[in-house]
Image (tube, coloured by chain):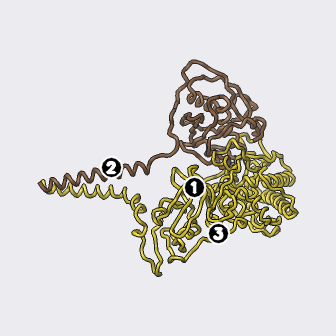
Chain colours: A yellow, B brown
């Protein structure tokens, strides 16, 4: 009996030890040399490494331990330098840029500092890592492993500063380009991103007879898309094509990653009182008092050297993702004015004005951007109209006219640039 | 004898493993962000009262508009909470409109480094009518009422169910402590 009890106790302890081991394992594996975790791949010199990603983002500490990188974040928590066996690169917290040997690559999302941990967008693996390792990098389809090519199989594929999209740019860009006399001639729109507001679990405004903002704005956006493609010949991308949830930052990312020339977020309005009716168009507001310290530093236009490797390195500083819209405010205002005028004239409704507000969906937009409220679903008579297909068609036509007019103004060089 | 030794060794190992495991678990689970330093739900108790300006909306939903109201005055967090509850109860004047949807409760208010943290229940999102400007008026009726009546507070951080949120109802950025915007009394941002 005693012996049995002791065996039972030992077994119990073993199970507990195994459980305690579970806590240790996730912390322990990346801390070891990556080569232990790596298996030999099919091709000579190829390596396969297990990958841990959360929501298409990868933790910097994981890469540092697996690839024996040296990383240093400056004291302000802004600039991050990474050095690997074959080279180095520089990143800016809050920016999607990777800088190496004077060239730039743009990631699909900004680098973020969260509670002391640096998180990189997943495409850093394929776009940034080759600069550090000198090997090609592919990520397996389910995203659970990294496949490294043999030594010397890959290098950094960056572009010259002047070839960057404007949103992923740097503060001194215009000046830099003028010095290089490479400012491009004004051209019209080629890609427009339309953003039907809300979707999925985000219902948006609700009318008293059950009209849902998320449904009617999708319908308006679809009609507008068809008009723009057929009558203006521009490429149109919708941030959502059906009734599903899309995050606000994701919407801007879709616009930025499609290199859109124009972003229009389409919403339907609501007020606390049902008598309120009319039309409003918004563009983003920035006020210095609302910015945090790192953003203020940018406004003060503090330029830093970004790359030690190149001799005549231009003084550049990556623009923070949240600040991307700042460079486009003057253009956004001119676009918003055209939208509002066209809407009020076509719909003969009450003009509630062009307004500025701190709208989250416009913050990271790296192109002229506006948000239009195409009528109040909280107003019973406007709600009835907003449900009608013919009414939605007229709204879409009014928005089309505004975009077409903005397009012509761009070609004629009438649109002023600047931060307001 | 040998078995006792093995058992003792195993127990010691187990204890060490549990301690390490637990510490890792704690560091993994450690919450980020501010921890409430002051939470008050009761009525301010000094017996004093003051007249404050509550920021509601005009009937047309274009601008913020004032209504004066006398409230009990005491310790800051408790008095801020009281003023927010006055906002929730709505305007007395006929020509003003409420700015906070029905069913909203204040979970807590705390003050740290001249920032008032106002934690509301999720009804502030789910019951909100929607609309960019309505949402702006909701946010700044809260922010202005606090920053304009309490000289010891510079900014207001709104929380929903204890957490920071990107927006209340999908439009206005509230992901940082906000300073007051008295220009909204004129309907301007």
Find disc 3 in the rendering and name its residue.
A158
Front-most of A291 and A356? Answer: A291
The reply to whether residue A212 is visible in this rendering is no
For the question of whether residue A156 can be seen, the reply is yes
Q: Is residue A404 left or right of residue A99?
A: right
Please give the label number shown on residue A156: none
For label 2, the residue is: B19
Q: Chain of mark 1?
A: A
Residue at mark 1 to residue at mark 3: CA–CA distance: 21 Å
Q: Residues within 10 Å of mark 2 (few under 14, many from 20)?
A: few
CA separation in Å, label 1 and label 2: 32 Å
Query: Is A158 on the left-hand or right-hand side of B61?
Result: left
A201 or A101: nearer the viewer = A101
Residue at the (60%, 36%) spot, across then down: B115
Q: Secondary structure at mark 2?
A: helix
Considering the image in quadrants, where does the N terminus of chain B appear? bottom left
Q: Considering depth in this image, is B81 or A287 the residue closer to the camera?
A: A287
């Amino acid at each position: 009996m005693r012996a049995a009890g002791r065996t039972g106790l030992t077994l119990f302890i073993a199970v507990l030890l195994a459980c305690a081991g579970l806590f240790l394992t996730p912390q322990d594996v990346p801390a070891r040399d990556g080569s232990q975790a790596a298996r030999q791949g099919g091709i000579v010199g190829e390596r396969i490494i297990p990958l841990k990603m959360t929501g298409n983002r990868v933790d910097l500490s994981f890469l540092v331990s697996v690839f024996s990188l040296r990383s240093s974040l400056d004291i302000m928590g802004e600039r991050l330098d990474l050095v690997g066996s074959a080279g180095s690169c520089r990143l800016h917290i809050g920016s999607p840029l990777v800088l190496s040997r004077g060239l730039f690559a743009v990631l699909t999302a900004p680098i973020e500092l969260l509670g002391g941990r640096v998180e990189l967008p997943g495409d850093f693996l394929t776009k940034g890592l080759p600069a550090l390792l000198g090997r090609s990098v592919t990520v397996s389809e389910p995203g659970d492993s990294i496949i490294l090519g043999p030594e010397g199989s890959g290098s950094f594929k960056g572009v010259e500063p002047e070839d960057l999209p404007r949103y992923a740019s740097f503060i001194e860009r215009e000046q830099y380009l003028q010095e290089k006399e490479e400012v491009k001639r004004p051209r019209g729109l080629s890609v427009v991103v339309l953003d039907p507001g809300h979707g999925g679990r985000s219902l948006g405004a609700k009318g008293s007879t059950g009209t849902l903002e998320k449904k009617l704005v999708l319908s308006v956006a679809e009609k507008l898309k068809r008009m723009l493609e057929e009558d203006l010949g521009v490429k149109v991308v919708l941030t959502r094509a059906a009734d599903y949830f899309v995050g606000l930052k994701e919407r801007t990312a879709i616009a930025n990653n499609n290199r859109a020339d124009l972003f229009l977020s389409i919403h339907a309005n609501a007020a606390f009182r049902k008598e309120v009716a009319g039309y409003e168009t918004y563009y983003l507001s920035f006020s210095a008092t609302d910015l945090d310290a790192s953003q203020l530093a940018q406004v003060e236009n503090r330029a830093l050297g970004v790359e030690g490797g190149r001799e005549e390195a231009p003084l550049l500083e990556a623009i923070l993702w949240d600040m991307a819209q700042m460079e486009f405010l003057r253009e956004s205002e001119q676009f918003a004015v055209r939208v509002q005028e066209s809407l009020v004239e076509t719909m003969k409704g009450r003009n509630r004005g062009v307004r500025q507000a701190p709208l989250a969906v416009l913050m990271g937009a790296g192109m002229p951007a506006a948000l239009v409220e195409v009528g109040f679903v909280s107003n019973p008579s406007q709600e009835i109209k907003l449900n009608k297909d013919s009414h939605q068609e007229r709204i879409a036509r009014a928005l089309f006219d505004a975009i077409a007019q903005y397009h012509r103004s761009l070609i004629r060089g009438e649109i002023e640039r600047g931060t307001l | 004898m040998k078995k006792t030794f093995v058992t003792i060794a195993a127990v010691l190992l187990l204890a060490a493993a549990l301690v390490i495991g637990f510490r890792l678990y704690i560091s993994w689970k450690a919450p980020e962000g501010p921890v409430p330093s002051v939470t008050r739900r009761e009525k301010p108790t000094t017996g004093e009262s003051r007249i404050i300006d509550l920021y509601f909306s005009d009937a047309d939903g274009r601008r913020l508009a004032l209504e004066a109201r006398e409230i009990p005055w005491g310790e800051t967090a408790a008095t801020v909470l009281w003023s927010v509850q006055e906002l929730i109860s709505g305007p007395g004047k006929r020509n003003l409109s409420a700015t906070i949807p029905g069913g909203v409760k204040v979970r807590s208010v705390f003050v740290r480094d001249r920032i008032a943290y106002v934690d509301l229940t999720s009804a502030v999102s789910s019951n909100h009518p929607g609309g960019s400007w309505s949402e702006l008026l909701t946010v700044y009726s809260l922010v202005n009422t606090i920053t304009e009546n309490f000289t010891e507070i510079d900014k207001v951080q709104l929380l929903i169910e204890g957490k920071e949120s990107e927006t209340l109802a999908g439009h206005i950025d509230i992901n940082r402590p906000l300073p007051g915007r008295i220009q909204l009394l004129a309907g301007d941002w």
